[in-house]
C-alpha cells in the first residue's frame, strides 16, 4: 500500500465484473506499506488533524473498552508506526490518527467464542456515517443497516475475521458515489448529496481501500480504511469502468441504492455513463 495521491488506476475495472450489481468480498493478501507513515500525503494529514480536533464531526470515537484493545495494538505496532506512548490510550491513538493516512477501527472480543465489537478508533473520513453511533456494536450489527449484506456475506465475514493469522494483512476495496469530493463525509457536516438532477459532472467516485490485520494474542483485529476520491468523469474514462458502473447502477436493488445514496440519481448517472462509454 502506498498512501501517496494517485490518478484512478485501470485496475478499478475489476470492481464491476459480472452482469449485475452484487456485493463482493474479493479478498487478497495485503501488500507491504499498510503500517508505514512515510507515504502519507501532507494535505491529507492536515485534514486528519482538523478532523481529530473537530467538535461537530469528531474524527475519534472511543469507549473505555477500547483502552485494552489499543494497548494490544500499540504494543504490537509501535515498532513500525512509531507510536508515542504517554500512558493514555486515547491520546496515543489521537497522536497516531494525525500522522497515519488510513482510518483505523479497533475490533475486540471478550472471549474466544465471542463476536468482535467496535470499541474505538480514528474515523476521520467516514462515508456518510457517524462512528460514535456504532460504538459497542458487533460487525453484524454495524452491517445490519446494509440491505442484503448480512444475508449474502455475513457468515463469510465472520469466518474470515475469525481466521485471520496474527500479523497478516488482508485487503479489499469498496466503492461508492458522492456529491462531493471531500474526504470528510460525516453526516454532521451536511455535504452535498446526489439527487435526481445530478449528472456525471456532479458526481465523485469514492474508493475505500480496506485492510484487516489480526493483532497477536487472538482478541483484537484492526480494520483500516484509506479513502480516495476522483471526479466520476475521470474514473469513467478508464477501460471497462463506465459501462460496468452503469450496469451496476441499473441492476442495484432499490434498498441498496438508497443506502448508497444514489437512489434518485442512478438513472441519470447510468445514462450519462453509457453516453461517455460510447464516445
Image (cartoon, rainbow, N blue to C red):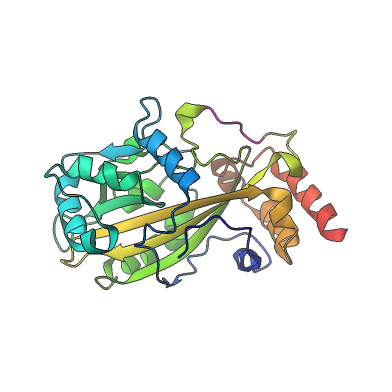
Q: Which residue does the image show at 55% across and 39% down from the upper left? A: 182
Which stretch is magenta?
A: 190-194
Between 14 and 98, the one lying in front of the other is 98
Residue 189 magenta: no
Q: Is residue 251 left or right of residue 260?
A: right
Q: Which secondary structure dominates the residues rendered in magenta?
A: loop
Please tell me which residue is depicted at 49% across the width and 69% down the height of the picture: 26
Say above or below: 150 vs 265. Answer: below
Q: Quadrant of the N terminus?
A: bottom left
Asked where in the image residue 203 lies, by quadrant, the reply is top right
28 relative position to 60: left or right = right
- Do we see residue 16 in this rendering? yes
Q: Nearer the viewer, residue 131 or 81?
A: 81
| Image x and y of residue 147, in percent | 50, 48
Q: List x then y, in percent, for residue 121.
A: 29, 45
Residue pictured at 34% horizontal, 51% vertical: 104
Name the residue at 14% across, 54% down.
Answer: 110
User: How many numbered marks, from 0 up?
Assistant: 0
Amino acid at each position: 500500500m502506498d498512501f501517496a495521491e494517485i490518478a484512478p488506476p485501470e485496475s478499478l475495472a475489476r470492481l464491476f465484473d459480472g452482469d449485475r450489481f452484487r456485493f463482493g468480498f474479493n479478498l487478497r493478501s495485503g501488500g507491504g506499506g499498510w503500517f508505514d507513515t512515510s507515504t502519507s500525503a501532507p494535505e491529507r494529514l492536515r485534514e486528519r488533524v482538523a478532523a481529530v480536533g473537530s467538535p461537530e464531526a469528531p474524527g475519534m470515537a472511543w469507549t473505555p473498552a477500547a483502552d485494552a484493545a489499543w494497548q494490544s495494538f500499540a504494543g504490537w505496532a509501535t515498532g513500525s508506526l512509531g507510536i508515542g506512548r504517554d500512558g493514555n490510550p486515547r491520546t496515543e491513538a489521537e497522536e497516531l490518527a494525525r500522522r497515519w493516512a488510513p482510518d483505523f477501527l479497533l475490533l475486540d472480543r471478550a472471549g474466544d467464542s465471542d463476536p468482535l465489537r467496535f470499541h474505538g478508533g480514528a474515523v476521520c473520513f467516514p462515508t456518510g456515517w457517524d462512528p460514535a453511533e456504532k460504538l459497542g456494536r458487533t460487525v453484524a450489527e454495524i452491517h445490519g443497516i446494509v440491505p442484503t449484506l448480512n444475508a449474502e456475506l455475513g457468515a463469510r465475514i465472520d469466518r474470515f475475521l475469525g481466521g485471520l493469522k496474527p500479523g497478516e494483512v488482508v485487503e479489499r476495496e469498496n466503492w461508492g458515489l458522492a456529491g462531493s469530493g471531500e474526504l470528510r463525509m460525516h453526516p454532521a457536516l451536511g455535504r452535498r448529496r446526489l439527487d435526481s438532477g445530478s449528472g456525471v459532472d456532479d458526481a465523485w467516485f469514492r474508493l475505500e481501500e480496506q485492510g484487516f490485520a489480526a493483532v497477536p494474542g487472538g482478541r483484537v483485529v484492526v480494520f483500516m480504511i484509506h479513502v480516495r476520491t476522483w471526479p466520476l468523469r475521470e474514473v469513467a474514462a478508464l477501460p471497462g469502468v463506465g459501462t460496468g458502473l452503469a450496469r451496476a447502477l441499473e441492476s442495484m436493488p432499490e434498498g441498496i441504492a438508497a443506502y448508497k445514496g444514489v437512489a434518485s440519481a442512478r438513472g441519470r448517472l447510468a445514462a450519462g455513463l453509457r453516453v461517455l462509454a460510447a464516445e
